[in-house]
Amino acid sequence: MTATKGLEGIVATTSSISSIIDGVLTYRGYNIDDLAEYATFEEVVYLLWFGNLPNQDKLSELRERLDEYAAIPSAVIDQMKLYPSNANTMAVLRSAISALALYDVTANDMSREANVDKAIKLQAQLPTIIAAFARIREGKEPISPKAGHSIAYNFLYMLNGEEPENSAVVAMDKALVLHADHELNASTFAARVTVATLSDMYSGVVSAVGALKGPLHGGANEAVMQMLEEIGSLNRVEDYIQHKLDDKEKIMGFGHRVYKNGDPRAKHLQKMSRELGNMNGNLELYEMSTRIEELVTGQKGLKPNVDFYSASVYTMLGIPRDLFTPIFAISRVSGWTAHILEQYENNRIIRPRAEYTGPLSQLFIPIQER
Ligand code: ACO
């Protein structure tokens, strides 16, 4: 038995949810470029869960159910009020999702119907949790979701307490479409491993949030923004990046296990970053980002991934840095739950082997003689 480090190149399951073939990403066979251009996030959620694009009636039905579930139990809000105000936001999300399960009497009902229902609840409630905590930590009361609006609209509304600009809603919606699913990424794999033991959907999503949190995965968008803040201005980019490259340090937001010729999502986020910069009359973050890209791609051949330009996009939307990875989760929970439903449909426990590298034939010595 020989191990493959990081399971690179290992095909661990079949799936009909999203594909990466020759650098092209599709959800259910629809190119991400078309979905980013023409689909709303709710259409994408329906597509991921049910395998086809909804007609208007089906979409309205889904949106009504999302509205119905968007409020979170008051007991979970009360618990969040007890969390430390400086708690890590992904840890808050992980804890609050775990708490949600305690108040859902269907949490352990393994029927397909109950699981689809839980997917809708989770999709509806993650934005509410994050917006609520962002307000609670500032001593403000959480704002209830407003029925009849998109997830993108509602998230911005619940976060800021005012009607969001249409341009901000459109940008947020597109970012959610672009992050919704990505084949067997680390967090989705974590979710599938958990539920393949026939554990419940909440446990699968909690595992996924834990995996997304790390800076090599979803946490990279926050790390990118931290880097941009450290650099501070366009004229300092070259020195800073050159130093990192010379020291063989990682530049966050670059590289990818699967895409070696560029992440097809990055160009959409780059365009959004430029457009928002133009709209705000301040292109500095965009220009710093493109300069970093020139240097890193020029010297290392590494291309930006989905996390690189999303950092400047979210900042230009006025969102605090430590909500970037939770926003990734708001979107990716659609993919996680689609994969969990698929895993249940055709389950076998996921239990690989390890190549043992420790000592063998050890002689046991009783404790008194050690
Ligand atoms: N900056 C500098 N060098 C890098 C970077 C980077 N961002 N990414 C990879 N490299 C280098 C590696 O050091 C390695 O060099 P070596 O061969 O001299 O040792 C080479 O490129 C190959 O990289 P691997 O480590 O084999 O790539 P792997 O597939 O294991 O990791 C990963 C992929 C985790 C995305 C990596 O590129 C990385 O750490 N990037 C920065 C973090 C990041 O942006 N993560 C988000 C990914 S997208 C997402 O999850 C949503």
Image (spheres, rainbow, N blue to C red):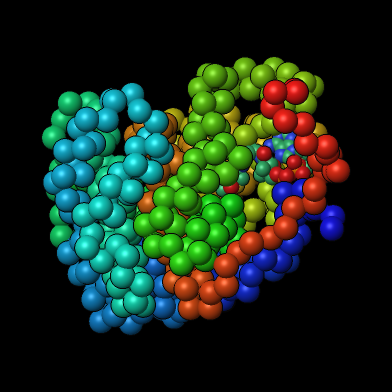
Q: Identify which residue is drawn at 15% across, 60% down.
A: 147
Q: Position of residue 88 (x, y in %)?
A: 39, 31
Given residues 314 and 92, the one toward you in this image is 92
Image position of 115 (left or right of 8): left
> Total label count?
0
Q: Identify which residue is drawn at 29% across, 55% down.
A: 101
Q: Position of residue 365 (x, y in %)?
A: 77, 31
| Image-quadrant location for residue 366 | top right
Q: Quadrant of the N terminus?
A: bottom right
Q: Position of residue 163 (x, y in %)?
A: 18, 46
Q: Position of residue 242 (x, y in %)?
A: 74, 22
Query: Where 179 sits versus 134, above or below?
Result: below
Q: Identify which residue is drawn at 53% across, 74% down.
A: 347
Q: Does residue 11 show up?
A: yes
Given residues 336 and 97, the one toward you in this image is 97
| Image-quadrant location for residue 41 | bottom left
Image position of 96 (left or right of 195): left
Q: Quadrant of the C terminus?
A: top right
Q: Does residue 270 show up?
A: no
Given residues 299 and 132, the one toward you in this image is 132
Q: Identify which residue is drawn at 17% across, 64% down.
A: 68
Given residues 49 and 35, the one toward you in this image is 49
Quadrant containing ligand 1 reads top right
